C-alpha cells in the first residue's frame, strides 16, 4: 500500500498537485489556512486536517507548497504547527520557494525531532501542475530522493537530483536567472528591431526558424503582439526573484553583469506600475526609454 | 531553362552555396580572388570567370558572398569590377554582411546602371549552408524577391521577406543581438550555478527540460563541458557584430542596456586574447571575475 | 556644568572621538568590550564603566560608535545591556553605521523606556575624527538635535540635520553612493587614458585644473601612482555599503544603473582577493579586463 | 615682434579666443564662413581674409576652432582651402574637437607641404574662453608646443603637454568621460536620496562639506534645484562625445562598464527629447524610471 501523504498549502499550484496525488492512489490528508479551498479535494477523497500538527501526525510524508518562508515557518513552528510532529521516519518535502540558506537552517531544526528534509521546488507553472508535467528540482540525501520518486512522478514528469538540501533552490535560481535574462533580451531585441523598421510578426517568424528559438519566446509572443500582458508569471515576482538571485550572487562572489542590468529594468517596471502584469511587460520599460516617433530616426526610408 | 547565375566569393559559406545552385540545375559562373578555391565547383560544371565584370556580363542574377563592405566594394568598383556590367534587367543579390546604411547607399549606385539590388544575408553557418538549410533574410522590392524564391530555396529552406533593401541586414542584426544576449546569459547563469555548487551536467539537464531550452544552448553545451571553444562563430566576430548593433541602436535611439553590457564583455574577451575561440568563450570572461576557490564561498556545505 | 556623557565603542573612530569630548570638558564614562582600549582615555580623565548598563545609568547622553547592528544590539539588549537604563530624559545617539530601517525600529524600542533616539552617522574617517573635523549627519527630533549641537561640535566641524531618525543613515548612503561612483569612474577613466597612451601624471594634472577636480581624486592619486592601495576605506567595506545601498534602492524603487554596475565591479574586486586594500584597488578589476599589451592597441604610435 | 597669427572659425568659442590674441598684441588675420561674425574683431584691429588660403599665406601660425572634422576638412582642402599654403616653417594648430585618428591622419598630410601640426583642444567653455582661462591640451612635437606657449597663454591659463599629435584629443576624451560619469553619478545619487526622503538642499550641503565636492557639482546644483536645464553643455553633445569615447575604448580594448551605462542613459535623454537641454537633464531620465509617488515607498515615515 502507498504511504500516507500530508499536503499543506492549497493555492494555484497546491490544489492540482494534491489532486494528482489522489489520482495516483495516495492516501491524502490536506491542510490549508482557509479550509474552503480543500472542499473539491475532500470530495475526491482527501481528509481535511484541523491543524498542521494533526496532518503531520497522520502522514509519513509531509509536503508543503506555500508562498514563502514566513508561511512555511508558521505551518511548522506556529500554534498547532507541524514541527514537533515530524518525528523519526517521517520526511518533510518543501516545494515552496525559499532560499538555499533558509533550507540549510531548516534541515538541522527538523533533524532534531528525527525527520528528513527534502527541498524540491518545481520548474513549471499552473498548467504543468494540472497536467502532472512539472519538473521537480530535488535537494537532500540522494537515496531518500530516489525513494520518493514515485511521489514526485505523480506530480511531475521528471525529477532532477540537484545535491544536498538547499541545492534544489539553487537550481531554481539558475533557471530563473536565465528566464529573466532571456525575457529581457527578447524584449530588448524586439524593441531594437521595431525602431529599425522591422515588422514584429516577421521578427518572430525569423526567430522561430533559427537556433535561438525557445518555447519561452513562443509563449510570450502573443503578449507582444497584442500589447496585453496577462500574468502567468507576474513581473513583480520576477523582480523579487532576480533581487534574490543578485543577493545570492553577491554572497557567492559570482559576477552578474547582465543580471544586475536586468534587475534594474524589472524593478523599474514595478516602480512604473506594471508589477502585476506578466514579466513580458518588461518591454514597456524599454519602450519608455525610446523615441516616441520611431519613423523619424528609422534608417529604412526608401 | 533556368536563368544563368554568377556567384562571387568562394569562402566557407560560398563554396557549398554555389554547389547547391549547381545541384539545382542553374548555369553557374563563379569568381574568387584566389581562383584555386573554384576548382571543385568547376569540376561540378561551373565556369570560372576571369574578372567580376566578366561574370556579371554572363549572368542575369549576380550573387556576392564576401567578408564585408571593403571586399564587396572591390568586386563592384575595383579594376575589372562588376559594377558597370550590372545593367538593366539584371539583379544583384548581396548575401554578405554589411550595414543597412551601406545597402541603402548601394541601391541607387546600382540603379544608375539599371540593376536591382536585393540584400539577402543569411541566418545559419557552415553546416546549414552545406545542407541547403539556411534561412534567407531578404530585403528589396517585394515582387522581385518573390521571383527569386526558387534560387533562394536552392540555398536555404526558408525565405523571409524583411522590407526594402537594407532591412535584410537589419533583421540579421536583430537575430545577432538575441544571439549575443542569450550566449552571454547562458554563460552568466552557468557560472553563477557553478559557484553555487551545482553540477554543470545537471544544470544542462534541467535547462533542456524547461521552457528556456533552445537549440543554441544544446549546440554550445559541449564547449562548456569540455572547456574547449572551437570556433563556429568566433568571439571576435560576435564582438564586432555587437559593436555594429550598438552603433545602429545609437542612431535609432534604441535603448540597449543588456546589449551594451554584452558588448563590454565580448570586447573584454577579445582584449584578453580569446577572440579566435568560439563566442562561448565569453564564459571565461565571467570566470576571470569570479573567486578562484568557489567552494569557500559555496552555500552548499553539508 | 556640562551634561555627563557615556561613550560606547572604542575603535579607530571611537577613541579619538571620546578624547575630543574629554578635551571639550564633558564628564565622560566609557565602555568597550575589551577594556584595554579604554586605558589612554582613563588617563585623560574618563571613567571606565563595567557594563553598558552601568554607563547608561551614569550618563544623560549615551553615544554608541560600534561596527554595526549586531554589536549595537549586544550593547543595548545583551547581558548587562544599556537598553533598560535609557530612561526618560536620556538621549541615545547612535553614530554607528546601521540601516534607516534598523533605526526606525530602534526608535520605539527606546521610547518604551523613555529615551530619545538620535541617529548620527559621520562623514569622514580616522584623520578628521582625530582633528574634530567630522561632518555629523543627524536624524531625530529637530529641537533635540539642535540642543545636542555643542556635543556634536566637539566631535566634528559641522552638523547637518537630515530629518527624522533614520535619515542620517539615508544621507550617509547618498554620500557613499557618490563616493563609489566617483572612485569607479576615476579608475575607469584613468585606465581608458592609460590604454590610449596618456601619462598618469599628466592626466592627474589635467584633472586638477578643471571643474571635475575633487579632494577625493587628490587623496587617491597617490595610490594610483604607486600602484599601492593602503586601506583608508577598504574595498570590501565599499562593496558592502554599495550592496546595502542597492538593497535600499530596490525597496525605494530608485533606479541605480551606474550603482549596480559599480556593485558588480567592487564585488569582483573582493572575489579576486583585493577586499582588504583601499577602494582605489577597483582599478585592478578594470585592468584585469584590459589587454595586457596596451601599446599594440594604442592609437598613439608616432 | 610677435609672429602673425591666422584664426579660422569665429563661433561661440572662436570670437573671444581671437579677441584675446588681439589683446595680447598678436597681428591677427581672421576667417569665417559667414564674414559678419568677424566685424567686432575687425573693429579691434584684425584683418579679414577672403579665403582660408589667403589667411594661411599671411600668417606663421594658423589656428582652427571649428565644429568638427567636416568643417575642418573644408577649410583645409575645399575650394580656396588653407592646405596648400601651409608651407615649411608654418604651424597649424587645430583646437577643434576631432578624433585622435583624424589628427594622426592629418599630420602627414600637412607634413607633405612642410607645416607642423599641433592638436590643442581645450578644457573649458564660453566663460573661460572670454576670460582667457581655458586649459590647453596640446599634442605634437614637444619643443614646438613649448615655443607656442606664449600664444596658448594668451588664450588660456595653462598648457598641458599630452604627447604626440592626437594625444591632446585623447586627453580631452579622458576628461569628458569623467565629466559624463560624474554628472550621471550626481544625478543618480540625488534621485536615490530624493526617493529616500532627503531634502535636495540638505544633500547639496552635505556634499559640499565632504571629500567628494567638486566645482562641477556646485555649477550644476542650480539646475537641479530649479528643475531648469539651460544648456552650457547640451546633453546631445555629451551623448555624442560619450559615443565617441566608447568607440575609441572599443578600439583600444579598454573596458568601460560605467561609460557604456552612461552612454545608454544620455542617449535615452536625447531620444526622449531633452538633447538641447544641459547635460544635467540626465536626471530626468532617471526620474522617468522612478515611481511617481515617492512617499508610498519612502522609508522615512515617522
Image (spheres, coloured by chain):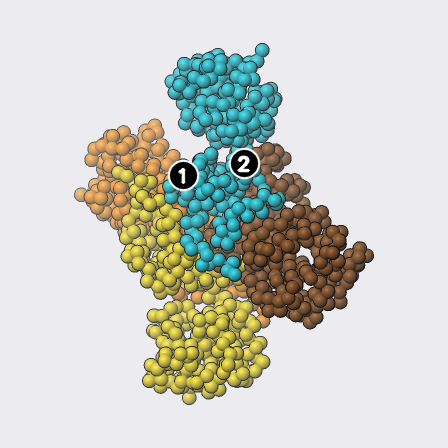
Chain colours: A brown, B cyan, C yellow, D orange
Dot 1: few (<14), some (14–19), or many (≥20) neighbours within 10 Å? many
Q: In this view of the protein, can residue A126 be seen by the observer?
A: no
Q: Earlier in the sequence, mark 2 or mark 1?
A: 2
Q: Which residue is tagged 1?
A: B275
Q: Position of residue B87 (x, y in %)?
A: 50, 15
Percent across and percent down for residue C99 are 51, 68
Q: Chain of mark 2?
A: B
Chain under callout 1:
B
Mark 2 = which residue? B175
Q: Which mark is residue A106?
A: none
Q: Is label 2 in a helix, a strand or a loop? A: helix
Q: Position of residue B202 (x, y in %)?
A: 55, 48
Crowding at dot 2, Cα within 10 Å, few <14 / some 14-19 / many 20+, comes out as: many
Q: Tell me the distance, in whole angstroms, between the alpha carbons under discs 2 and 1.
A: 21 Å
Considering every residue shown, the one lying at the far left of the view is: D1
Which residue ends up furthest to the front in the rendered image? Answer: A1
Give the x, y percent position of residue D33: 37, 35
Q: Against C154, is C279 above or below?
A: above
| Residue A251 in view, yes or no | yes
Residue appearing at x 35%, y 84% in the figure: C42
Q: Viewed as shown, does residue C102 lie left or right of D82?
A: right
Amino acid at each position: 500500500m502507498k504511504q500516507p501523504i500530508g499536503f499543506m498549502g492549497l493555492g494555484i499550484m497546491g490544489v492540482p498537485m494534491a489532486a494528482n496525488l489522489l489520482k495516483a492512489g495516495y492516501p491524502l490528508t490536506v491542510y490549508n489556512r482557509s479550509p474552503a479551498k480543500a472542499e473539491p479535494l475532500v470530495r475526491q477523497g482527501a481528509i481535511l486536517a484541523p491543524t498542521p500538527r494533526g496532518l503531520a501526525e497522520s502522514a509519513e510524508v509531509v509536503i508543503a507548497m506555500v508562498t514563502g518562508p514566513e508561511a512555511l515557518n508558521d505551518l511548522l513552528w506556529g500554534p498547532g504547527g507541524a514541527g514537533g510532529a515530524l518525528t523519526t521516519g517521517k520526511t518533510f518535502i518543501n516545494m515552496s520557494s525559499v532560499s538555499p540558506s533558509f533550507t540549510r537552517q531548516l534541515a538541522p531544526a527538523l533533524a532534531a525531532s528525527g525527520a528528513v528534509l527534502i527541498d524540491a521546488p518545481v520548474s513549471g507553472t499552473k498548467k504543468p501542475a494540472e497536467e502532472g508535467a512539472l519538473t521537480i528540482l530535488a535537494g537532500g540525501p540522494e537515496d531518500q530522493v530516489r525513494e520518493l520518486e514515485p511521489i514526485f512522478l505523480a506530480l511531475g514528469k521528471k525529477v532532477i537530483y540537484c545535491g544536498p538540501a538547499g541545492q534544489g533552490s539553487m537550481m531554481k535560481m539558475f533557471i530563473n536567472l536565465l528566464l529573466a535574462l532571456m525575457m529581457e533580451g527578447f524584449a530588448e531585441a524586439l524593441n531594437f528591431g521595431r525602431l529599425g523598421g522591422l515588422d514584429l510578426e516577421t521578427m518572430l517568424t525569423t526567430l522561430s526558424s533559427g537556433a535561438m528559438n525557445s518555447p519561452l519566446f513562443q509563449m510570450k509572443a502573443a503578449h507582444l503582439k497584442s500589447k496585453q500582458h496577462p500574468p502567468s508569471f507576474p513581473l513583480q515576482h520576477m523582480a523579487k526573484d532576480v533581487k534574490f538571485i543578485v543577493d545570492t550572487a553577491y554572497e557567492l562572489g559570482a559576477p552578474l553583469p547582465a543580471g544586475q542590468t536586468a534587475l534594474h529594468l524589472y524593478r523599474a517596471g514595478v516602480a512604473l506600475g506594471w508589477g502585476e502584469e506578466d514579466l513580458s511587460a518588461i518591454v514597456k520599460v524599454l519602450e519608455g526609454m525610446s523615441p516616441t516617433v520611431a519613423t523619424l530616426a528609422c534608417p529604412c526610408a526608401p
